[in-house]
C-alpha cells in the first residue's frame, strides 16, 4: 500500500459476527428498550437502576466465553501491526473485542462497557480492577455517583481533537460496519475527503452516507477485511 496514514472507523457491524447485535437491525439491541430510556442522560436520571441493569446484562454477554473477536477484528490488528505507516482505529463500539484481537492504537469514541465514571470528577474506573462495590464511587465515596462510561445521545464523544487531527492528516479513511446514522462519526468521511484522503466503505450494503465514499466493498466484514488486509 502506498498510504502513509490510515484512519479506520468501526461500528456495530464489525462485532456482529461475534454475536453482538447491531443497533438498527430489526432484531437490534434497542428492541426491548426505547433509546431515550437507556442511552440518554435524561433516561439515567429518571431510572438509574434500569440503565445499570441494561448495561450489566450487556457486560455479562461480553464476558461470557461465547463472545470472541472475529476475523474482522483480527484483520484490523494485523493491519496495524504490519503497515509501515500509522493506523488509528476509531471505534464506536463499546465492547473490548478490538483490544482482545491485539489493536493498540485505538480510540473508543462512544466509551467502554467495562468501565464506569464518576459523574462529578469524571474519573474513569475499570469494573474489574477498581470497583469493589458499584454502590459507592471510589473517588468521592458518594452513592449513585458512578455511571456507565458510555457516550449517550447529546453528550460529547471522546477524544474528538485527536480524531479530528488524524482525519485532517490521513490519506486513507475506511469505515467498516457502521450505518452512518449517528453523528459526528457519520461526518468523518466528509472531513477525510476535505483533507484529500481516499475513502472506502465496507459494509453489508451501502450505508446512508455511502455515496460520500470513493470506494465500496460489500459483504460480511469477517470475510472482506481479511482479504483486504492480506
Ligand atoms: C455489517 C455486518 C457485517 C451488519 N459486516 N457490516 C447532526 C444531525 C442530526 C443529529 C445530530 C447531528 N450531530 C449530532 C446529532 C445528535 C446525535 C445523533 O447523531 N443523532 C442521530 C440519531 C440523528 N449525536 C449525538 O448526540 C452524539 N453527540 C454529539 O453529537 O455531541 C455534540 C457534538 C457536536 C459537534 C462535534 C462533536 C460532538 C453522541 C452520539 C452517541 C451515540 N451513542 C450510541 C449509544 C451508546 C450506548 C450503548 O452502546 O449502549 O452509540 S447510539 C449507537 O449508534 C451506538 C453506536 O456506537 C452508534 C452507531 O451505530 P452503528 O455502529 O453504526 O450501528 P448500526 O446498528 O446503526 O449499524 C450497523 C451497520 O453494520 C449497518 O450498516 C449494517 O449493514 C452493518 N453490518 N453486519 C459488515 N457482518
Image: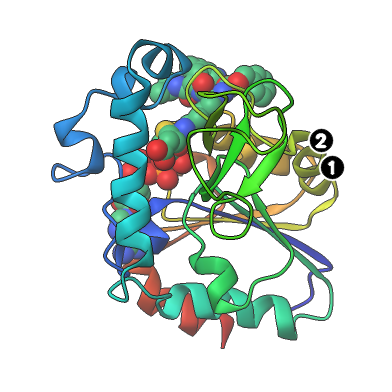
The residue positioned 49% from the left and 67% from the top of the image is 97
Q: Is residue 124 left or right of residue 34?
A: right
Q: Which of these two is toward me, 213 or 91?
A: 91
Q: Quadrant of ligand 1?
A: top left
Where does the image place residue 44, in percent across and percent down from the top left? 41, 19
Per the model, the C-alpha gap separating discs 2 and 1 is 6 Å
Q: From the image, which quarter does the C terminus lie in?
A: bottom right
Q: Which of these two is toward me, 194 or 130?
A: 130
The residue positioned 41% from the left and 55% from the top of the image is 177
Q: Residues within 10 Å of mark 2 (few under 14, many from 20)?
A: few
Q: Which of these two is toward me, 205 or 116?
A: 116
Q: Are marks 2 and 1 in contact (CB under 8 Å)?
A: yes
- Is residue 34 depicted above or below 203 in this figure? above
Q: Residues within 10 Å of mark 1 (few under 14, many from 20)?
A: few
Residue 43 visible to an observer of this rendering: yes
Quarter residue 69 falls in: bottom left
Where does the image place residue 101, in percent across and percent down from the top left? 54, 77
Disc tally is: 2
Where does the image place residue 3, in percent across and percent down from the top left? 79, 69
> What residue did someone put label 2 on?
161
For discs 2 and 1, the disc positioned in front in the rendered view: 2
Q: Is residue 131 left or right of residue 122?
A: left
> What residue did someone put label 1 on?
165
The residue positioned 62% from the left and 42% from the top of the image is 109
The residue positioned 32% from the left and 76% from the top of the image is 65
Q: From the image, which quarter does the N terminus lie in?
A: bottom right
Whether ligand 1 has any atom under 8 Å from the Cβ at mark 2 is answered as no
Amino acid at each position: 500500500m502506498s498510504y502513509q496514514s490510515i484512519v479506520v472507523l468501526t461500528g456495530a457491524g464489525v462485532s456482529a459476527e461475534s454475536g453482538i447485535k447491531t443497533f438498527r437491525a430489526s432484531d437490534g439491541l434497542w428492541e426491548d428498550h426505547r433509546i431515550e430510556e437507556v442511552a440518554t442522560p435524561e433516561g439515567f436520571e429518571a431510572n438509574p437502576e434500569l440503565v445499570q441493569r441494561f448495561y450489566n446484562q450487556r457486560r455479562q454477554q461480553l464476558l461470557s466465553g461465547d463472545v470472541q473477536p472475529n476475523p474482522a477484528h483480527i484483520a484490523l490488528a494485523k493491519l496495524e501491526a504490519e503497515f509501515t505507516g500509522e493506523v488509528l482505529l476509531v471505534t464506536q463500539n463499546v465492547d473490548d473485542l478490538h483490544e482482545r484481537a491485539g489493536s493498540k492504537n485505538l480510540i473508543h469514541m462512544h466509551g467502554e462497557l467495562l468501565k464506569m465514571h464518576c459523574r462529578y470528577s469524571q474519573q474513569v474506573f475499570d469494573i474489574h480492577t477498581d470497583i469493589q462495590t458499584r454502590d459507592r464511587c471510589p473517588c468521592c465515596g458518594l452513592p449513585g455517583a458512578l455511571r456507565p462510561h458510555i457516550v449517550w445521545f447529546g453528550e460529547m464523544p471522546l477524544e474528538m481533537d485527536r480524531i479530528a487531527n488524524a482525519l485532517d492528516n490521513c490519506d486513507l479513511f475506511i469505515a467498516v460496519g457502521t450505518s452512518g446514522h449517528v453523528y459526528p462519526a457519520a461526518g468523518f468521511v466528509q472531513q477525510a475527503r476535505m483533507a484529500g484522503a481516499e475513502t472506502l466503505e465496507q459494509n453489508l450494503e451501502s450505508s446512508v452516507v455511502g455515496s460520500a465514499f470513493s470506494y465500496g466493498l460489500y459483504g460480511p466484514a469477517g470475510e472482506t477485511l481479511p482479504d483486504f488486509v492480506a
